[in-house]
Amino acid sequence: MREVIPSQRVRVSARSNSAKSVDYKTMHSFISGASPSSGVRLQCPRCKANIDQLNCQFCGLRMPIQNGIVNALPPERAAHFARFIDDYERIRAAEGRWSQEDDFYLNLPYKDISGQNSNQWKIRARSFDYLIKHVLHRNLEHGGRILDLGAGNCWMSYRLALANYRPVAVDLLTNDRDGMGAAEHFRKYLPALFPRFQAEAARLPFQTEQFDAVIFNASFHYAEDYVATLREALRCVKSGGLVIISDTPWYSREESGRMMVAERSAAFLKRYGTASDSVKSLEYLTDEHLRSLEEHLGIRWTIYRPRYGLKWGMRPLIARLRKRREPSRFRVYATQKP
Ligand SMILES: C[S@@+](CC[C@H](N)C(=O)[O-])C[C@H]1O[C@@H](n2cnc3c(N)ncnc32)[C@H](O)[C@@H]1O
């Protein structure tokens, strides 16, 4: 693992809230038409055959388009995730992570106009600025195709499109509040909406080596198997391309991560009547996890440490002084496919 020294917060064109700052002609050439799969080469997520249409002629899996989103989640996998999706949607709605207003989505991550989760979004905005300036702009050509894995409401795909990349969004959720259906709020601000796929990160419906980068933003820790999930992302990225993990909680000690999971489950149970643990997500990273991924997959991480301000930086010390659990920290991890 290699450490990268942090630098100042930056401002990039991806911050613009409107599409006015975008070179429309350039963007049009990057986003090839409005079809839901837009030139992405497909693979059946069930039998792994390469296919050139949305129905697999080998195993019979059908991938219907629903509200502009390709459903690439086979029924047996939809059943596996059904309770997770149900719990997650209920909790996120109760946490106020949605709005009927375009402005809510257009302003993310820089401003949470609902005011419900503003402190979290401040951190997310810092990570995103850092990611764009220090990782993407330095390593990727404009127009690079980027897989936004675990895209949620697709705010990052929207920002990547504004920054002249070609995003493809993937998530389990398709609802129009906090899932990929919410990307409709971006439609009139882009020449064409990016492709969206309902799929699971460990079984992607894409042929190998066609993305310039894959980003797991606040989503890698939902994986049930880190090695399988990262291997799948590496399969889809081109040789020399990047796989990036950002906004996943990191702890210096395994025990701190375990304590966080137990505390959160108890809080969910009390507040929402469910521990939201139907899927055995791994929930956090440690250096041991990162080293194990390096060994299993023959990769090497570059670790970036964005600055989140003095108050945030003091949290571990304050927790130690108060004899509390170590707080989570956020770093950005990038690896280049050999
Ligand atoms: C905390 S949200 C992050 C959303 C978005 N990336 C962001 O930065 O706001 C995590 C997302 O990961 C998605 N997710 C969880 N497990 C997944 C899986 N196995 N495959 C695909 N997406 C998954 C969830 O549905 C959720 O939308």
Image (spheres, rainbow, N blue to C red):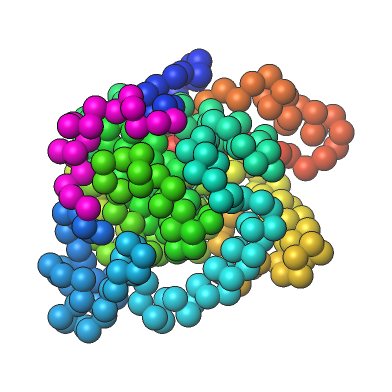
* Name of the residue lying farthest toward the left: 52
Residue 95: x percent and y percent? 69, 53
Q: Residue at x 58, y 49 (%)?
A: 99
Residue 302: x percent and y percent? 40, 32
Can I make out residue 294 in this image? no
Q: Is residue 309 above or below residue 264?
A: above
- Viewer-proximal residue, 316 or 158? 158
Residue 28 lies in the magenta stretch:
yes
Q: Residue at x 44, y 30 (%)?
A: 17
Residue 57: x percent and y percent? 15, 80
Q: Is residue 36 above or below residue 194?
A: below
Residue 142 lies in the magenta stretch:
no
Q: Residue at x 78, y 58 (%)?
A: 267
Q: Residue at x 18, y 31 (%)?
A: 26
Quadrant location of the N terminus in the rendered image: top left
Residue 198: x percent and y percent? 38, 64
Examine the image and state in which quarter residue 244 appears: top left
User: Is 177 situated left or right of 198 in this image?
Assistant: right
Can I make out residue 88 in this image? yes
* Name of the residue lying farthest toward the bottom: 60
Q: Which residues are magenta?
A: 17-34
- Viewer-proximal residue, 285 or 110? 110
Tag count: 0
User: Is 240 situated left or right of 8 in this image?
Assistant: left
* Name of the residue lying farthest toward the top: 8
Q: Is residue 153 above or below residue 175?
A: above
